[in-house]
Image: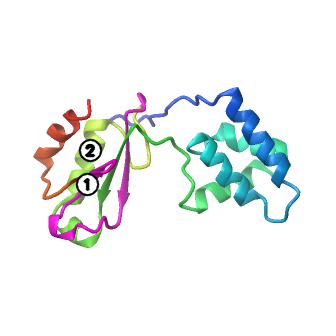
């Protein structure tokens, strides 16, 4: 696996920026406006890259450091885009004791990314979760709405091939 962080280029549009600036103008004078503004920004863009955080800072006068602090503190905010295929590996107790940590490691190796990242082509993103409610199928991963259970490390390449 590469030691260089994989990034997906920011592809925001002028229409998205105009929509965000309109939202900010409507909300910025209200007390506690930062959270609703950031939530709307994430709805518009799908995540909160530094470019979007900078727009929020410029338009509200709130320091970028504060916006980044909020974005990294609350789990509802994503700093990286999600892939077309969102992979989530359960690392809850039942799955973990049956090998989901190894499955997660294999996914990182095959995709060339770490948890929370998206492949440069925008195809796959990888995250860990704590439970998908399928403990009897442990270890479990989901790709979008597809559930894969009783996994082994040897299953992973074949499963990913279905999404190529």
Residues marked 2 and 1 touching at CB (< 8 Å): yes
Marker disc for residue 107: 2
Q: Quadrant of residue 66?
A: bottom right
Label 1 neighbourhood size at 10 Å, few (<14), some (14-19), many (20+)? many
Q: Is residue 39 left or right of residue 159?
A: right
Single out the mark in the foreground, 2 or 1.
1
Mark 1 highlights which residue? 141
Q: Is residue 38 left or right of residue 93?
A: right
- Name the residue: 29% across, 68% down: 92
Q: Quadrant of the C terminus?
A: top left
- Name the residue: 27% across, 40% down: 109
Specify whether residue 91 is painted magenta: no
Q: Earlier in the sequence, mark 2 or mark 1?
A: 2
* Above or below: residue 31 compared with residue 54: below
Element on which disc 1 rests: strand
Where residue 124 appears, as percent x and y from the top left, is: 36, 38
Q: Which residues are magenta?
A: 120-146
Specify whether residue 135 is painted magenta: yes
Q: Is residue 82 left or right of residue 47?
A: left
């Amino acid at each position: 696996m590469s030691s260089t962080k994989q990034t997906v280029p920011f592809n925001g549009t002028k229409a998205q920026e105009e929509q965000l600036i309109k939202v900010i103008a409507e909300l910025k004078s209200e007390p506690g406006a930062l959270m609703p503004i950031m939530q709307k920004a994430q709805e518009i863009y799908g995540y909160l890259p530094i470019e979007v955080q900078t727009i929020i800072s410029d338009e509200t006068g709130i320091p970028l450091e504060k916006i980044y602090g909020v974005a990294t503190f609350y789990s509802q905010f994503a700093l990286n885009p999600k892939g077309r295929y969102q992979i989530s590996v359960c690392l809850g107790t039942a799955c973990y004791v049956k090998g989901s940590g190894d499955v997660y490691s294999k996914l990182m190796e095959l995709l060339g990314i770490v948890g929370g990242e998206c492949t440069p082509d925008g195809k796959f993103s990888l995250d860990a979760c704590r439970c998908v409610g399928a403990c009897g199928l442990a270890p479990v991963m989901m790709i979008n709405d597809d559930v894969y259970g009783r996994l082994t490390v040897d299953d992973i390449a074949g499963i990913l091939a279905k999404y190529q």
